[in-house]
Image: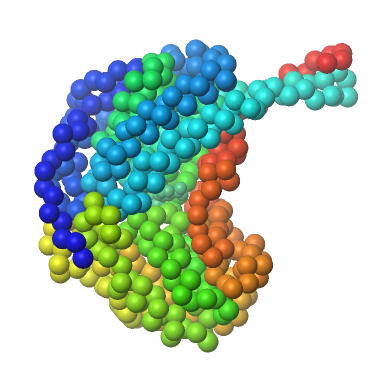
Amino acid sequence: MTTVTSTARTNFDGGRLFVDGRFRRATHVEPVIEAATGEPLGNGSSATESEIDDAVAAADAALAGWRATPAAERATILLRFADALAARSSTTNELCTRENGMPIRLSRGSNGAFPAALLRYYAGLIAESDEEEIRPAMIGHTIVRREPVGVVGAITPWNYPQALAAMKIAPALAAGCTMVLKAAPETAMDALIFGEAAEEVGLPPGVLNVVAGGPVAGAHLVQHPGVDKVAFTGSTAAGRVIAEMCGRLMRPVTLELGGKSAAIILDDADLDATIKGLRSASFVNNGQTCHLSSRILAPRSRYAEVVDAVAALADGLTVGDPLEKTTMVGPLVSARQRERVLNYIDIGKSEGGKVVAGGSVPTDQPRGWFVSPTVFADVDNSARIAQEEIFGPVVAVIPYDTDREAIDIANDSEFGLGGTVWSSDADRATDIARAVRTGTIGVNDYQLDMQAPFGGVKASGMGRELGPEGLAAYQTLKSIYRVGPA
Ligand code: NAD
């Protein structure tokens, strides 16, 4: 346990927007609250409709020049952009951790290192991929062109603010698109670091514009006539609203939404290794992770043993100041999020679930938005705490009898985003992984791979980010039919 002591406000200026290559004062400045203290950390902002209009106009004006810039030149600028972000990483890590409570060790990788790595990856990919391909046709031949889709409206949540923004910025800019990024109000400050880095490296004005704001600002961006594609990460509820808007507008949209993934522990699993892996797979980022294995499926023959081990894992996680490098679980992002999680704990109890670890606010954390890592046993998969995304450090252990039943339980969910299978036989586990209806799944671990597509099925979303598929999401195809030989 590490009690939070820091109270100083940051001197990072979050009351700005980055539009058309310049910073300007935001009209509506709002405080950003530090997750670990519940006190103001500094200023953020909430973009007005006219500020979003300006940002879209800047992205639109920049589009012709950026898409005409040779891919190799775009790649060179993105590499410089990556270096400028990497140079700011210690500021970024700390700022994000103070905004949303992410343990600093995770923040270093996710907020500090990942965006630069992703920019480098997409810079490499665009530099080596051909814009045009010639295919022989019945009569003549066809030039198949990959063209940038245009101006992108990107909307991100607060849980992995830098990584999720980079998953949109890097492929979109590599493809030759321009962008307006709207960050969540809870993490309005760190998003401006993308603007600072862009300004330093001379990214052409308007190629990337950064604003912050809530659902009203987001809805204005989604429906803006100047936007050609929407890239959204957030809740399934907001994703449905955005999908309807985009459907009406015939606007392409990528939706990265919620999850309720299953960790399937097979009867031959090495329990010590499994529990070590579940520390991250089921509790990473204080449980505020979309692909979390928050339903733990245990074979009935080993159910008591698994419940005891998962409870011991939760009890053993170091809860405290997210800026301390030994902290494993920090606070939730906001008072509202803590209310939501505590409410789900009450629902779990009223449904007959048995709390075997945690279950309340830790008494040694009088400030901030902490919830103790919580484990429910004796949960049926039909319970609300097994079906609905809680988005906090709360897991349910569910018994099963056969491998087939484990797969059926894993698939008995509105969602399909992540998941894990744990076994001493990797091939057996991989066969189970093949049978789970999900966009991503790990065998004996869960590690995102930036070169492989990431995304969900069912209510977890549509489309993919990362890998070459993440680049294709920002490209549109054009066929030019030509008579005669190529
Ligand atoms: P949220 O949907 O409330 O907000 C996400 C973003 O969308 C914010 O920027 C918000 O201002 C904006 N927004 C909300 N309603 C909108 C609307 N109607 N129109 C336009 N913009 C709108 O989600 P949250 O609580 O901030 O984030 C947590 C959710 O995000 C969880 O459900 C989590 O699973 C999901 N998530 C998914 C992924 C993924 O890759 N699949 C990754 C991280 C988080």
Q: Quadrant of residue 189?
A: top left
Q: Quadrant of residue 88?
A: top left
Q: Residue at x 57, y 30 (%)?
A: 124
Left or right: residue 159 versus residue 257 is left
Give x and y (percent) for residue 96. 28, 43
**311 versus 257 height, above or below:** below
Give x and y (percent) for residue 240. 45, 46
Q: How is the image coloured?
A: rainbow
Q: Residue at x 64, y 64 (%)?
A: 430
Give x and y (percent) for residue 438. 56, 57
Q: Quadrant of residue 478?
A: top right
Q: Is residue 99 visible?
A: yes
Q: Residue at x 13, y 58 (%)?
A: 367
Q: Residue at x 37, y 28 (%)?
A: 84
Q: Quadrant of the N terminus?
A: bottom left
Front-lying residue, 101 or 460: 101
**25 versus 466 height, above or below:** above
Left or right: residue 300 versus residue 367 is right
How many numbered circles are shown? 0
Left or right: residue 302 versus residue 27 is right
Q: Is residue 462 visible?
A: no
Give x and y (percent) for residue 343. 26, 66
Q: Quadrant of the C terminus?
A: top right
Front-lying residue, 394 or 430: 430
Front-lying residue, 270 or 386: 270
